[in-house]
Image (tube, rainbow, N blue to C red):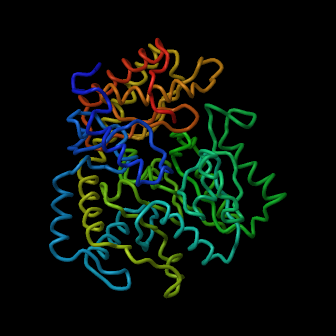
Amino acid sequence: MTDRHIKTELPGPKARALLARDSKVVSPSYPRDYPFVMSHGRGTEAWDVDGNRFLDFMSGIAVCSTGHSHPVVVQAVKDAADKFLHISSDYWHEGQVRLGERMNELSPMKEPTMSFFCQSGTESVEGALKLARYVTGRPRFIGFIGGFHGRSMGSLSFTSSKYTQQLGFFPTMPGVTHVPYPNNYRPLFAGAEQGEAVLRYIEDVLFQGPVPPTEVAAMLIEPIQGEGGYLVSPPGFLAGLRALCDRHGILLIFDEVQSGIGRTGKMFAAQHFDVVPDIMTLAKGLGSGLPIGMVIAKQAIMQKWKRGAHGNTFGGNPLCCAAALATLELVENGLMANAAAVGGHFMAKLRELQARHEVIGEVRGRGLMIGMELVTNRAGKVPARELCDRIVDRAYYNGLLLLACGKSTVRFMPPLSVTRAEVDEALEIVERTMIECSAAPPQAGAQAR
């Protein structure tokens, strides 16, 4: 093994045994990558069942925002569990009300908000879509190519980061029109300002042709696109989208499932752009690992819902609310600032790495939501898809947990508690892994993706 923390051949014997059991009883539909079988974790570190130690820079797909098993979050969950495990959302409890109050205090809406509680990102998107259709009476929506919003049938109709997510499930919810997400690195339109070009395309092509703007209920967008490649929307684009929506009476929904709760160095990515959405969806890092999602909307919008218009059984679960409240306190009182500071250090180190390696085409992101796009050559910007997959896979064997996104982007989303020393350690593994993957053919037995 090439890393001092790897004690056994990977996957080890205990991991192999569990993988064999899993193959007989668990759905094969999960998009799994390398064969990591977790035993326990603490902060940025995770151990597999064979005792191998890893740095976790994917944190459960940006879910473990406060790190693995943060003691404050664990204690909050234990205290809540001592009282009661469940009461349906038909009734009330202190934790749910307090979490709604905290979101009202923290939200980027700049006016009073109300919250709907659920269990996941896809459910929060479903709730936002239903709310938008309910209050506007309009049937259509606009989404963005490369977006990921979930896998249930309504949210899936917007998801377009990989065709495999849609393959075999057509027709999904009708009425969704996709437009390009502005990408200055890989422009689809003529001209340098891709944000302006996308706005013109919506206004001058879509709204003059196949999509009557008076029938559009909402536009759904990630301020920083996640699965599509960790793309940061260009300056002025979201403000222009806000103005376009206002002109036509269209609601603007920000999907902050991945980018929210301090991930970008601010509580919400929207705050980097000073743009106010009408509705916002949250999940992932909100509960530090417990399943919780929320729809946050301007009070003037959400209060139009009538009794029974939407609901669920597990929304506002007391353990999940306790975890979320503890998470918000930790994020607001130190981890968000750490994400900004350590994220700046991380980006600077990645740019030094870029100067040494021609295959790194672009480094981009905010806070600890960082993408490193790999290319076959910088001039042509040809995506290095195979190399990206090999690096993500090989990094596991070197003791680092990563995920990819977009065409050929390695994404970094460690816990917000990550230290500069852990970043430096991870980058040493990244560079060593890049050299190994560039110099040698794929290893036999590497996981196909």
x then y, percent, for residue 355 = 46, 15
x then y, percent, for residue 57 = 34, 37
| Outermost residue toward the bottom in this view | 307
Q: From the viewer's perspective, tell me whether residue 362 is left or right of residue 294.
A: right
x then y, percent, for residue 200 = 74, 48
All told, the count of numbered labels is: 0
Q: At 38% across and 26% down in the image, what residue appears? A: 348
Q: From the viewer's perspective, tell me whether residue 176 is left or right of residue 111.
A: right
Q: Quadrant of residue 193?
A: top right
As drawn, 387 above or below 364? above
Q: In the rendered image, is residue 57 in sight?
A: yes
x then y, percent, for residue 100 = 35, 72
Q: At 45% across and 22% down in the image, what residue appears? A: 444
Q: At 44% across and 77% down in the image, what residue appears? A: 312
As drawn, 190 above or below 116? above
Q: At 53% across and 46% down in the image, what residue appears? A: 225
Q: Quadrant of the N terminus?
A: top left
